[in-house]
Image: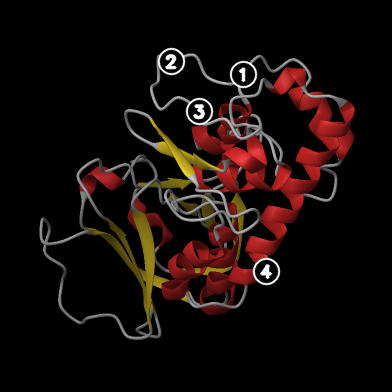
Amino acid sequence: MPELPEVEALKDFLTEHLVGHEIVRVLPVAISVLKTYDPPVTAVEGHQVVAVHRYGKFLDLATADGPHLVTHLARAGWLHWKDRLPSGMPRPGKGPLALRVALETGAGFDLTEAGTQKRLAVYVVQDPQQVPGVARLGPDPLAEDFDETRFAALLKDERRQLKGALRDQSLIAGVGNAYSDEILHAAKMSPFKLASSLTAEETARLYAALRTTLTEAVDRSRGLAAGRLKAAKKSGLRVHGRAGEPCPVCGDTVREVSFSDSSLQYCPTCQTGGKPLADRRMSRLLK
Protein backbone atom coordinates (compact mmCIF):
# COMPACT_ATOMS: atom_id res chain seq x y z
CA MET A 1 0.00 0.00 0.00
CA PRO A 2 1.36 3.44 -0.88
CA GLU A 3 1.75 5.48 2.28
CA LEU A 4 2.65 9.08 3.06
CA PRO A 5 6.21 9.06 1.59
CA GLU A 6 5.17 7.43 -1.71
CA VAL A 7 2.06 9.59 -2.09
CA GLU A 8 4.16 12.68 -1.33
CA ALA A 9 6.57 11.63 -4.09
CA LEU A 10 3.66 11.03 -6.47
CA LYS A 11 2.36 14.50 -5.61
CA ASP A 12 5.73 16.03 -6.54
CA PHE A 13 5.95 13.94 -9.72
CA LEU A 14 2.43 14.89 -10.84
CA THR A 15 3.01 18.54 -9.99
CA GLU A 16 5.90 18.52 -12.44
CA HIS A 17 4.03 16.60 -15.16
CA LEU A 18 0.42 17.79 -14.82
CA VAL A 19 0.30 21.40 -13.63
CA GLY A 20 -0.34 23.75 -16.52
CA HIS A 21 -1.78 21.03 -18.74
CA GLU A 22 -5.38 20.40 -19.73
CA ILE A 23 -7.25 17.19 -18.98
CA VAL A 24 -8.95 16.25 -22.25
CA ARG A 25 -10.28 12.80 -21.40
CA VAL A 26 -11.09 10.74 -18.32
CA LEU A 27 -11.95 7.12 -19.07
CA PRO A 28 -13.30 5.03 -16.19
CA VAL A 29 -12.62 1.42 -17.17
CA ALA A 30 -13.83 -0.13 -13.91
CA ILE A 31 -17.01 1.63 -12.81
CA SER A 32 -16.47 0.39 -9.25
CA VAL A 33 -13.58 2.85 -8.88
CA LEU A 34 -15.96 5.84 -9.02
CA LYS A 35 -17.26 6.80 -5.58
CA THR A 36 -19.08 9.98 -6.65
CA TYR A 37 -21.43 10.65 -9.56
CA ASP A 38 -22.39 14.32 -9.28
CA PRO A 39 -20.51 16.04 -10.74
CA PRO A 40 -19.62 13.27 -13.23
CA VAL A 41 -16.02 12.25 -13.72
CA THR A 42 -16.07 13.97 -17.12
CA ALA A 43 -16.53 17.32 -15.34
CA VAL A 44 -12.75 17.71 -15.10
CA GLU A 45 -12.37 17.45 -18.89
CA GLY A 46 -11.46 20.71 -20.57
CA HIS A 47 -9.94 22.10 -17.38
CA GLN A 48 -6.31 22.86 -16.66
CA VAL A 49 -4.60 21.29 -13.66
CA VAL A 50 -3.45 24.12 -11.39
CA ALA A 51 -2.14 22.19 -8.36
CA VAL A 52 -1.62 18.73 -6.89
CA HIS A 53 -2.12 18.25 -3.15
CA ARG A 54 -1.69 15.38 -0.71
CA TYR A 55 -4.06 14.73 2.18
CA GLY A 56 -2.76 11.78 4.16
CA LYS A 57 -2.73 9.00 1.54
CA PHE A 58 -5.14 10.85 -0.80
CA LEU A 59 -4.00 12.62 -3.98
CA ASP A 60 -5.92 15.70 -5.12
CA LEU A 61 -5.73 17.15 -8.64
CA ALA A 62 -7.13 20.68 -8.50
CA THR A 63 -8.40 22.16 -11.77
CA ALA A 64 -8.92 25.78 -12.80
CA ASP A 65 -12.54 26.84 -12.34
CA GLY A 66 -13.52 23.19 -12.06
CA PRO A 67 -13.79 20.29 -9.64
CA HIS A 68 -11.10 18.27 -7.92
CA LEU A 69 -10.16 14.75 -8.96
CA VAL A 70 -9.26 12.96 -5.72
CA THR A 71 -7.94 9.41 -5.55
CA HIS A 72 -6.94 6.91 -2.90
CA LEU A 73 -4.76 4.05 -4.15
CA ALA A 74 -5.78 1.73 -1.28
CA ARG A 75 -3.84 -1.50 -0.77
CA ALA A 76 -3.25 -2.65 -4.34
CA GLY A 77 -3.67 0.45 -6.47
CA TRP A 78 -0.97 2.29 -8.36
CA LEU A 79 -0.42 5.17 -10.76
CA HIS A 80 1.44 4.57 -14.03
CA TRP A 81 2.63 7.62 -15.95
CA LYS A 82 2.89 7.38 -19.74
CA ASP A 83 4.56 9.98 -21.96
CA ARG A 84 2.33 8.69 -24.75
CA LEU A 85 -0.92 6.96 -23.91
CA PRO A 86 -2.17 4.13 -26.13
CA SER A 87 -4.38 5.41 -28.93
CA GLY A 88 -7.09 2.78 -28.66
CA MET A 89 -9.94 2.69 -26.17
CA PRO A 90 -9.23 0.48 -23.15
CA ARG A 91 -11.47 -2.56 -22.81
CA PRO A 92 -13.32 -3.10 -19.53
CA GLY A 93 -12.58 -6.32 -17.72
CA LYS A 94 -9.22 -6.80 -19.40
CA GLY A 95 -6.44 -6.53 -16.84
CA PRO A 96 -6.00 -4.26 -13.82
CA LEU A 97 -6.67 -0.91 -15.53
CA ALA A 98 -9.31 1.06 -13.60
CA LEU A 99 -9.14 4.63 -14.93
CA ARG A 100 -7.19 6.60 -17.55
CA VAL A 101 -6.52 10.35 -17.56
CA ALA A 102 -5.29 11.93 -20.81
CA LEU A 103 -3.75 15.37 -21.35
CA GLU A 104 -3.75 17.59 -24.41
CA THR A 105 -0.12 16.58 -25.03
CA GLY A 106 -0.98 12.90 -25.49
CA ALA A 107 0.62 12.04 -22.15
CA GLY A 108 -1.28 10.96 -19.07
CA PHE A 109 -1.62 8.28 -16.45
CA ASP A 110 -3.41 5.05 -15.71
CA LEU A 111 -4.74 4.01 -12.33
CA THR A 112 -4.55 0.24 -11.88
CA GLU A 113 -5.50 -2.17 -9.13
CA ALA A 114 -4.28 -5.72 -8.65
CA GLY A 115 -6.26 -8.44 -6.91
CA THR A 116 -9.97 -8.85 -6.35
CA GLN A 117 -10.77 -6.57 -3.38
CA LYS A 118 -11.21 -3.43 -5.53
CA ARG A 119 -10.71 -0.69 -2.96
CA LEU A 120 -9.15 1.86 -5.32
CA ALA A 121 -11.29 5.00 -5.08
CA VAL A 122 -11.79 8.06 -7.29
CA TYR A 123 -13.91 11.07 -6.31
CA VAL A 124 -14.89 14.17 -8.29
CA VAL A 125 -15.85 16.94 -5.86
CA GLN A 126 -15.97 20.70 -5.61
CA ASP A 127 -13.99 20.60 -2.35
CA PRO A 128 -11.67 17.77 -1.14
CA GLN A 129 -13.33 18.02 2.28
CA GLN A 130 -16.42 16.49 0.66
CA VAL A 131 -14.52 13.19 0.50
CA PRO A 132 -15.36 11.41 3.79
CA GLY A 133 -11.87 9.93 4.14
CA VAL A 134 -10.26 13.35 3.74
CA ALA A 135 -12.69 15.05 6.12
CA ARG A 136 -11.89 12.65 8.95
CA LEU A 137 -8.09 12.82 8.64
CA GLY A 138 -6.01 13.67 11.66
CA PRO A 139 -2.99 15.99 11.48
CA ASP A 140 -0.21 15.39 8.99
CA PRO A 141 2.85 14.12 10.91
CA LEU A 142 5.25 16.10 8.72
CA ALA A 143 3.41 19.41 9.06
CA GLU A 144 5.43 22.21 10.62
CA ASP A 145 2.92 22.65 13.44
CA PHE A 146 2.89 18.94 14.35
CA ASP A 147 5.24 19.19 17.31
CA GLU A 148 5.94 16.83 20.20
CA THR A 149 3.37 18.54 22.44
CA ARG A 150 0.61 17.97 19.91
CA PHE A 151 1.69 14.36 19.42
CA ALA A 152 1.66 13.71 23.17
CA ALA A 153 -1.85 15.17 23.45
CA LEU A 154 -3.10 12.77 20.76
CA LEU A 155 -1.74 9.72 22.59
CA LYS A 156 -2.57 10.78 26.15
CA ASP A 157 -5.98 9.09 26.33
CA GLU A 158 -5.46 6.45 23.63
CA ARG A 159 -6.32 3.07 25.17
CA ARG A 160 -5.09 1.26 22.08
CA GLN A 161 -1.85 -0.46 21.21
CA LEU A 162 0.72 1.67 19.43
CA LYS A 163 0.51 -0.27 16.17
CA GLY A 164 -3.21 0.42 15.82
CA ALA A 165 -2.96 4.02 16.98
CA LEU A 166 -0.26 4.89 14.45
CA ARG A 167 -2.33 3.41 11.63
CA ASP A 168 -5.54 5.24 12.55
CA GLN A 169 -5.96 7.90 9.86
CA SER A 170 -8.29 9.95 12.06
CA LEU A 171 -5.53 10.19 14.66
CA ILE A 172 -2.48 10.72 12.41
CA ALA A 173 -2.75 10.97 8.63
CA GLY A 174 -0.66 8.95 6.21
CA VAL A 175 0.97 6.15 8.21
CA GLY A 176 0.07 2.59 7.22
CA ASN A 177 1.15 -0.94 7.97
CA ALA A 178 4.70 -0.71 6.67
CA TYR A 179 5.82 2.59 8.18
CA SER A 180 4.16 1.90 11.52
CA ASP A 181 6.43 -1.17 11.76
CA GLU A 182 9.43 0.93 10.80
CA ILE A 183 8.60 3.73 13.26
CA LEU A 184 8.19 1.31 16.17
CA HIS A 185 11.44 -0.44 15.30
CA ALA A 186 13.27 2.89 15.21
CA ALA A 187 11.71 3.83 18.55
CA LYS A 188 12.56 0.40 20.04
CA MET A 189 8.98 -0.18 21.19
CA SER A 190 6.63 -3.15 21.14
CA PRO A 191 3.75 -2.74 18.68
CA PHE A 192 1.41 -3.86 21.46
CA LYS A 193 2.41 -1.31 24.08
CA LEU A 194 -0.55 0.86 25.09
CA ALA A 195 -0.30 4.38 23.68
CA SER A 196 -1.61 5.95 26.90
CA SER A 197 1.08 4.21 28.97
CA LEU A 198 4.00 6.06 27.39
CA THR A 199 6.28 8.08 29.64
CA ALA A 200 7.44 11.52 28.59
CA GLU A 201 10.77 10.04 27.48
CA GLU A 202 9.05 7.31 25.46
CA THR A 203 6.72 9.83 23.83
CA ALA A 204 9.70 11.95 22.80
CA ARG A 205 11.45 8.87 21.41
CA LEU A 206 8.41 7.78 19.42
CA TYR A 207 7.85 11.29 18.08
CA ALA A 208 11.47 11.49 16.92
CA ALA A 209 11.18 8.07 15.27
CA LEU A 210 7.95 9.09 13.53
CA ARG A 211 9.38 12.28 12.07
CA THR A 212 12.77 10.80 11.18
CA THR A 213 11.41 7.63 9.57
CA LEU A 214 8.92 9.48 7.40
CA THR A 215 11.30 12.30 6.49
CA GLU A 216 14.02 9.87 5.42
CA ALA A 217 11.51 7.86 3.36
CA VAL A 218 10.29 11.03 1.64
CA ASP A 219 13.89 12.01 0.88
CA ARG A 220 14.60 8.58 -0.63
CA SER A 221 11.50 8.86 -2.82
CA ARG A 222 11.84 12.47 -3.90
CA GLY A 223 12.70 12.92 -7.56
CA LEU A 224 11.97 9.32 -8.53
CA ALA A 225 9.69 8.47 -11.41
CA ALA A 226 6.36 6.95 -10.38
CA GLY A 227 7.43 3.53 -11.63
CA ARG A 228 10.43 3.38 -9.30
CA LEU A 229 8.70 4.27 -6.03
CA LYS A 230 7.64 0.76 -5.04
CA ALA A 231 11.19 -0.57 -5.30
CA ALA A 232 12.58 2.43 -3.41
CA LYS A 233 10.10 1.86 -0.59
CA LYS A 234 10.93 -1.82 -0.26
CA SER A 235 14.69 -1.25 -0.29
CA GLY A 236 14.45 1.28 2.54
CA LEU A 237 12.46 -0.90 4.96
CA ARG A 238 14.37 -2.43 7.87
CA VAL A 239 11.83 -4.83 9.37
CA HIS A 240 8.55 -4.64 7.49
CA GLY A 241 8.26 -7.47 5.00
CA ARG A 242 11.55 -8.95 6.21
CA ALA A 243 10.44 -11.76 8.53
CA GLY A 244 13.20 -14.35 8.87
CA GLU A 245 15.95 -11.91 7.92
CA PRO A 246 18.51 -10.48 10.37
CA CYS A 247 17.70 -7.16 12.00
CA PRO A 248 20.08 -4.55 10.50
CA VAL A 249 20.58 -3.04 13.96
CA CYS A 250 21.25 -6.01 16.23
CA GLY A 251 21.31 -9.10 14.00
CA ASP A 252 18.42 -10.89 15.71
CA THR A 253 15.87 -12.57 13.45
CA VAL A 254 12.97 -10.36 12.42
CA ARG A 255 9.70 -11.98 13.57
CA GLU A 256 6.12 -11.71 12.37
CA VAL A 257 2.65 -11.63 13.87
CA SER A 258 -0.08 -12.57 11.40
CA PHE A 259 -3.69 -11.39 11.44
CA SER A 260 -6.64 -12.29 9.23
CA ASP A 261 -5.85 -9.73 6.55
CA SER A 262 -2.43 -8.32 7.43
CA SER A 263 0.76 -8.92 9.38
CA LEU A 264 3.37 -6.96 11.29
CA GLN A 265 7.10 -7.47 11.61
CA TYR A 266 9.38 -6.55 14.51
CA CYS A 267 12.73 -7.33 16.13
CA PRO A 268 12.48 -9.03 19.55
CA THR A 269 15.88 -7.78 20.75
CA CYS A 270 15.26 -4.18 19.72
CA GLN A 271 11.58 -3.94 20.65
CA THR A 272 10.31 -6.55 23.13
CA GLY A 273 13.21 -7.31 25.47
CA GLY A 274 14.15 -10.40 23.48
CA LYS A 275 10.74 -12.06 23.93
CA PRO A 276 8.85 -13.12 20.79
CA LEU A 277 5.23 -12.00 20.53
CA ALA A 278 2.65 -14.76 20.27
CA ASP A 279 1.58 -15.17 16.66
CA ARG A 280 -2.10 -15.68 17.37
CA ARG A 281 -4.70 -12.93 17.50
CA MET A 282 -6.39 -14.34 20.61
CA SER A 283 -3.16 -14.97 22.48
CA ARG A 284 -2.02 -12.80 25.34
CA LEU A 285 0.45 -10.35 23.75
CA LEU A 286 3.34 -8.56 25.35
CA LYS A 287 2.69 -5.05 26.46
Q: Which residue is mark 3?
A: 277
- Looking at marks 1 and 2 on the same chain, the residue that comes earlier in the sequence is marked by 1
Q: Secondary structure at mark 1?
A: loop
Q: CA distance from mark 3 to mark 1?
A: 17 Å
Viewer-side residue, 21 vs 13: 13
Image quarter for residue 270? top right
Q: Residue at x 59, y 25 (%)?
A: 192
- Tell me how far mark 3 sits from mark 4, CA to CA: 32 Å
Residue 283: % across, % down:
43, 15
The crowd level at tag 2 (other Cα within 10 Å; few <14, some 14-19, many 20+) is few
Left or right relative to 88: residue 160: right
| Residue named by callout 1 | 160
Going 74% across and 47% down the picture, which residue do you hit?
209
Q: Position of residue 201 (x, y in %)?
A: 88, 32
Residue 240 position (above or below residue 228):
above
Q: CA distance from mark 1 to mark 4?
A: 30 Å
The x and y percentages for residue 134 are: 56, 38
Mark with earlier residue (1, 4): 1
Residue type for callout 4: Asp
Which residue is located at x 22 percent, y 49 percent? 115
Q: Which residue is mark 2?
A: 283
Question: Residue 228's x, y, as percent?
Answer: 45, 74
Tell me the SS state at disc 4.
Answer: helix
Earlier-in-chain disc, 4 versus 2: 4
